[in-house]
Image: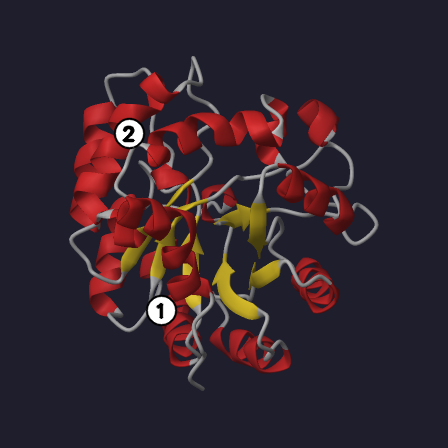
Amino acid sequence: MTIDAHLHLWDLDVSDYAWLGPQHGPLHRSFGPDEAARELRSSGIEAAVLVQAEDSLADTGWLLDVARTHDWVLGVVGWVPLDRPDQAATALADLDEPALRGVRHLIHDDPRAATFLGLAEVRESLRLVAERGLVLDVPDAWPTHLDAVGDLAEALPGLTIVVDHLAKPPWGTAAMSGWAASLRAVAQRPNVVAKVSGLAGAEPYTAATLRPVLDTALDAFGAHRLMYGGDWPMATARHDYAGALGPIAELVSALSPHEQAEIRRATALRVYGRVRHD
């Protein structure tokens, strides 16, 4: 049984999703829960974590509404204004429900990307996040802010930090060694975990291409701090759901039964399914 720890939904009637436009081709439409459920069922995925696609309370509220009415949703990673602690505190109180498992900010789209996680205001908000037993997802971390993840993890050891998409490896470039070194460094912090997700940009997209990246991640984190994420529908720009899952599933199936269980299910349950402690 597998849990998808990274799945997006968006509804163009809920918000405009400023990053999304006609230039994104087939992605420029709404992707709702019923379509997602069909994709998950067809690939044997039992549950998924919904991850915000916009830095807005409107998007987060909509995802929580979906979670209330769809039992395949394990939890929601939403958004609060981390750079405004008073507003973040209010938002966390207003959104206080079991479905909310974490928060995320589209740091890579923020002009303060290189310094955002070090801002005093952001760290004050993240202390509140940690106190509520919620996690922080960090997108597209390498090279701009992956090192800052390690600094944050040391400063807030009670906060679980999730590195999305293995920090986006720079496929086929000389920078791969720098990515690997940074990933290994951040993995030294025991409160950092990572998602084997968002890898569809690899060319060719095969198990052989992905193997060195997964081997690096396994060596750095161990299977008990890795989890699978499909990154639907972003991956559909290149592959359908089954096509995006295929090479990752092939690699994971070659691991020990214990390692397979960790990546496919157990890590996601520990990170997103645990009982909250307010």
Along the viewing direction, whichever of 137 and 56 lies nearer the viewer: 137
Q: Amino acid at mark 2?
A: Val
Q: CA separation, marks 1 and 2?
A: 30 Å
- Name the quarter where the C terminus is drawn: bottom left
Image spot of residue 170 (x, y percent): 34, 25
Q: Is residue 115 visible?
A: no
160 w.r.t. 39: above or below: below
Image spot of residue 72 (x, y percent): 64, 58
201 w.r.t. 217: above or below: above
125 w.r.t. 246: above or below: below
Along the viewing direction, whichever of 96 and 259 lies nearer the viewer: 259
Judging by the rendered image, the residue that carries numbered circle 2 is 213
Q: Quadrant of residue 191?
A: bottom left
Q: Is residue 203 left or right of residue 47?
A: left
Q: Is residue 231 left or right of residue 214?
A: right
Q: Quadrant of residue 146?
A: top left
Image spot of residue 257 (x, y percent): 30, 45
Furthest residue to the front? Answer: 257
Crowdedness near tag 1: few (<14), some (14–19) or many (≥20) residues, C-alpha within 10 Å: some
